[in-house]
Image: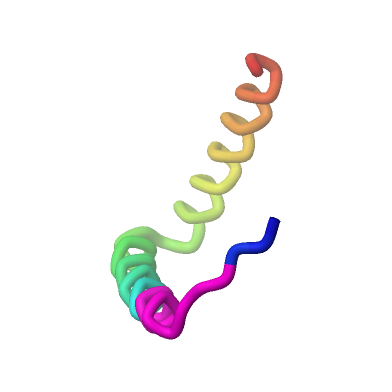
Amino acid sequence: MQVLLTSKGKAEALEYRKIYKQADQILLGAISDSELKLLYELLDKLSLAMEDVL
């Protein structure tokens, strides 16, 4: 199955990406690089634990 976006859908997707990128910069700007590294490590740990559950 293949899903294609209309012109309007493509424009909406681009706008969403811009908004997401801005939010990402704001949120990640609130923590230091070492905190970000720790966050990713903890998320990886939780992800592995979820694999065991599912």
Q: Position of residue 3 (x, y in %)?
A: 60, 64
Foreground pick, 49 / 9: 9
Give the image quarter of residue 24: bottom left
Is 28 contained in the magenta span? Answer: no
Q: Position of residue 2 (x, y in %)?
A: 67, 62
Q: Which quadrant, please, contains the N terminus?
A: bottom right
Residue at horizontal 57 percent and vertical 71 percent from the top? 4
Q: Which residues are magenta?
A: 4-14
Foreground pick, 4 / 42: 4
Magenta span: predominant SS is: helix
Residue at horizontal 49 percent and vertical 46 percent from the top? 39
Residue at horizontal 64 percent and vertical 14 percent from the top? 53
Q: Is residue 46 left or right of residue 23?
A: right
Count the labels in the image. 0
Q: Which quadrant, please, contains the C terminus?
A: top right
As displayed, is residue 54 above or below residue 28? above
Which residue occupies the extreme top position in the image?
53
Q: Position of residue 43 (x, y in %)?
A: 55, 39
Residue at horizontal 36 percent and vertical 59 percent from the top? 31
Is 12 contained in the magenta span? Answer: yes
Foreground pick, 30 / 18: 18
As displayed, is residue 6 above or below residue 2? below
Q: Position of residue 21 (x, y in %)?
A: 39, 73
Give the image quarter of residue 30: bottom left
Q: Is residue 12 left or right of residue 42?
A: left
